[in-house]
Structure formats: structure tokens, C-alpha cells
């Protein structure tokens, strides 16, 4: 599947109940974060997504809501997207890198 366009990501983020999910490390989050919108945070690395797996339902109880996942480059967001879909989330978008989300 092709990467979503900025317009598609923005439309998904603008829907009622949408959740923006940052899956970067705590250290990365302390350095830079999304400033214009509220977001949730759960750590997910390519090797270990335990934090996300344990906290997904707490952070995002509505599995039909749009979940827009991002990280530093998009790779961890892709892994997080796969995990969330396996957990039954229906509308997960890998938005790629935080640095590319200036339009949000």
C-alpha cells in the first residue's frame, strides 16, 4: 500500500476522536515533539513494542477511531501500525516522520 499523502493524514487527524500516536523513545520526545496538537505516547522500537502492546487499549480505547502513528523516520511507526492492526484497530495510518508533519 502506498504511503498516505499529507492531505489524507490531515483529513484523518481532523476527524472527531482521532489519536496522534508518537512511538519514539522518551529521549527523542524530550528533544522534539508535536506542538500544535495533542498526542499520545507509547514506545515502540523495531525490536520491542512491549509498551505499546500493554498500553494500546488504555491510550486508544476506540478501535474504530483514526490512529495516526509517527516516529523519527516511519519505520517504527510501520511496526506500530502492524501491531495495532493485529490488536483490532481498524483505521491506523503510518504518517512517517515527525519532521514531515509540519502541516498538522
Image (spheres, rainbow, N blue to C red):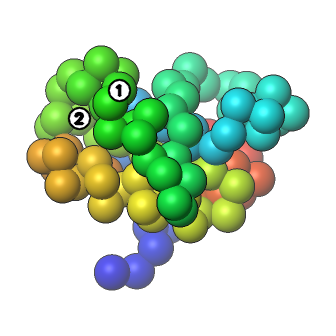
Q: Is residue 75 left or right of residue 67?
A: right
Give residue 16's position: percent from left, percent from top: 30, 25
Q: What SS does tag 2 mark? A: loop
**Residue at the image position 54 percent from the left and 29 percent from the top:** 41
Callout 1 crowding tier (Cα within 10 Å): few <14, some 14–19, many ≥20: some
Q: Which mark is residue 55?
A: 1
Would you identify the image quadrant in which residue 12 lies?
top left
**Residue at the image position 31 percent from the left and 61 percent from the top:** 82
Gap in angstroms between the C-alphas marked 2 and 1: 16 Å
Give residue 25's position: percent from left, percent from top: 68, 39
Q: Is residue 8 above or below residue 39?
A: below
Give residue 95's position: percent from left, percent from top: 52, 56
Q: Is residue 10 left or right of residue 98?
A: left
**Quick one: 102 or 52, which is closer to the camera?**
52
Q: Is residue 66 above or below residue 18?
A: below
- 2 vs 1, front mark: 1
**Quick one: 80 or 21, which is closer to the camera?**
80
Callout 2 crowding tier (Cα within 10 Å): few <14, some 14–19, many ≥20: some
Q: Is residue 13 left or right of residue 90?
A: right
Q: Which mark is residue 65?
A: 2
Amino acid at each position: 500500500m502506498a504511503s498516505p499523502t499529507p492531505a489524507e493524514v490531515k483529513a484523518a487527524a481532523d476527524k472527531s476522536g482521532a489519536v496522534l500516536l508518537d512511538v519514539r523513545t522518551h529521549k527523542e520526545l524530550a528533544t522534539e515533539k508535536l506542538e500544535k496538537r495533542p498526542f499520545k505516547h507509547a514506545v515502540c522500537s523495531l525490536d520491542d513494542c512491549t509498551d505499546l502492546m500493554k498500553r494500546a487499549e488504555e491510550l486508544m480505547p476506540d478501535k474504530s477511531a483514526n490512529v495516526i502513528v509517527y516516529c523519527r523516520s516511519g519505520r517504527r511507526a510501520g511496526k506500530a501500525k502492524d501491531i495495532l492492526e493485529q490488536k483490532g484497530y481498524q483505521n491506523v495510518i503510518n504518517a512517517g516522520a515527525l519532521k514531515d508533519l509540519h502541516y498538522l
